[in-house]
Image (cartoon, grey):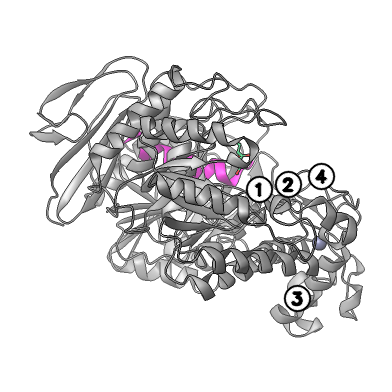
Amino acid sequence: MINGKLPKIWYGGDYNPEQWDKATMEEDMRMFKLAGIDVATVNVFSWAKIQRDEESYDFAWLDDILSRLAEENMFVCLATGTGAHPAWMARKYPDVLRVDYEGRKRKFGGRHNSCPNSPTYRKYARLLAGKLAERYKDYPQLAAWHVSNEYGGYCYCDNCERQFRVWLRRRYGTLEKLNAAWNTAFWSHTFYDWEEIVAPNALSEEWNGNRTNFQGISLDYRRFQSDSLLECYKLERDEIKKHAPGIPVTTNLMGFYPQLDYFKWAREMDVVSWDNYPAMDTPVSFTAMAHDLMRGLKHGQPFMLMEQTPSVQNWQPYNAAKRPGVMRLWSYQAVARGADTVMFFQLRRSVGACEKFHGAVIEHAGHEFTRVFRECAELGKELQQLGGRLLDSRSRARAAVMYDWENRWGVELSSGPSIALNYVDEVHKYYDALYQLNIQTDVIGVEEDLSRYKVVVAPVMYMLKPGFAQRVERFVAQGGTFVTTFFSGIVNENDLVTLGGYPGELRKVLGIWAEEIDALLPGQHNEIVMKENWGPLHGSYPCGILCDIIHAETAEVLAEYGADYYEGSPVLTRNRFGQGRAYYVASSPDAAFLQGFLANVCEEQGVEPLLNAPAGIETAERVKDGSSFLFVLNHNADETAVDIGPRQRDLLTGRDVSGKVKIPGRGVMILARAADPE
Ligand code: GLA
Ligand code: ZN
């Protein structure tokens, strides 16, 4: 459990009473009760309020807020407030200000604006965290610590550049090793002194954010910046732990956020938390995948939904309102996929600045007679009724999709073969196919233990880290099915090509080698022509983006290209290896192919769908103490009939249901039954 003090799904969110007067806070207390809200995240952006200079710390206002919340028996997720530095600090100690990608020194402004290698920032952030922890360690309502806020962004200042060199010395030890890792013999880049190394940005090696002359340098700078921000997090966390070792510490992540290696971050966090802000046109399967990734960061441990909007956002180009029922539906989607909290940004809408049009539980109208408040209050009641039943329940997926940030950086920084190749999209295509098939899937990192899975899908596994290929071999040899695609096994962790034919170290398990890579223009396609019908797969399917031109060695060929000079050469292969199988998909197929293909792959392994349900129905399962909780989510606006099979108890209505049931548009069922034996 995240914290046994509050043994139910936490319900609440970001709360900023310091922006209001006391009477407003009283009104908030009344309305929180009406809405069933029991958690407030406070102090997220209050550094300047606490500290007017280096010496003075004013916690009196925070004492007041916390004691008022305690009187109401509200729990608190206490932020350290270091997500935005005070103006006086920027003026007096300009090292806290970042230098941007273009090389411009920033002035004071915005948030998430501190240089992670600024001695001033580190000093005062750490001090503040320590003082907060010391002061509030025995606060009875303290449920979790929320360090800083949405860490992100890169800095290119002189301090960062210096620390980059220190980081590189630690990684490589000698310049010879560094020169080899970066292949600096190319374009006369040999470094003879560590001081010659500069940060890669628009003033040096890079342009457009992800175009670079030197993949090795740019890749290491991403690792270094992710590590630098992580150091900032760890400094604060360690201060907190000195005083309050028993309270869980987290920082709010952002799903597939590109800049930080969250697998590395999660190791330092007691519980993962994240902010879910899909655009109105984000596929629901993408949101599902992001939840699954957040669950995968800590090997299946439940996570916190730290933020979502109850209604609208303000920072999208078009901020459509969540339709009636959607907030509830998406909240249960998070819970279905492992969230043990449902929290909002924000509890009350602010009166000024850029987030005044961001949705909140309490809208500008200021009373409870709004659609949004009513929906929040209904959900609050339901979560109270659910109690602690679902807490700590886990996924028992037998299928997994792999995702890795360093691999992503490698793919995104690559010059060629195609700018149309988008790693996250390729991962999502495979995830989406499993999602549409209602196959429970975990999203896992490349270091995860594979032995509990029967099917592991690793799209575009371009970068292979040491030991990865051997682990895949072991997994397949012991009976697992491994699926990978074009543009896999190309480079090592330094982005140096593994010579001797692609897919390098995966060649043996896949039983193929790739000779050439062809990039197709937008809208241009080749064909995947099945050699024989295979389950739902028959005839041909379009494919595009990249076409690997491969040779089967020990693999059997299941499909061939239908066109061009490589017509008749393999595009889909299966290699039997030990007790298992390894598939190679040499191009990027359409959804119809992927659903048929993964249905076959899962069937071969006895991995079954949670339900056979019509389109728009999402399913996900959590299990605990011999009970299974099957979430059935209707993303359709209209009532949809689903056959749920034998009799089960719907936790939301308390009624027993069986057979064909009708789920209202945007409706949810949580079906409880004894879990089948493993
Ligand atoms: C982020 C931040 C919040 C707020 C919301 C608005 O998630 O953490 O402070 O700005 O976005 O959507
Ligand atoms: Zn910096």
- Residue on which the image places disc 3: 168
- Residue on which the image places disc 4: 109
What element does badge 3 sit on? helix
Residue 235 % position (x, y): 63, 70
Residue 586 % position (x, y): 52, 47
The response on whether ligand 1 sits within 8 Å of label 1 is yes
Real-space CA distance between mark 2 and mark 4, rounded to the nearest whole angstrom: 7 Å
The residue at the point 65 percent across, 36 percent down is 520
Real-space CA distance between mark 3 and mark 2, rounded to the nearest whole angstrom: 29 Å
The residue at the point 17 percent across, 56 percent down is 625
- Residue on which the image places disc 2: 111
What element does badge 1 sit on? loop
Main SS of the magenta part reads helix
Q: Is residue 246 above or below residue 395?
A: below
The response on whether ligand 1 sits within 8 Å of label 2 is yes
Between disc 1 and disc 3, the foreground one is: 1
State if disc 2 and disc 3 touch (CB < 8 Å).
Answer: no
Between disc 4 and disc 1, the foreground one is: 1
Q: Give the position of the C terminus as an image quadrant.
A: bottom left
Q: In this orientation, does residue 584 appear?
A: no
The response on whether ligand 2 sits within 8 Å of label 3 is no
Between disc 4 and disc 3, the foreground one is: 4
The response on whether ligand 1 sits within 8 Å of label 4 is no
Q: Mark 2 belongs to which amino acid?
A: Arg
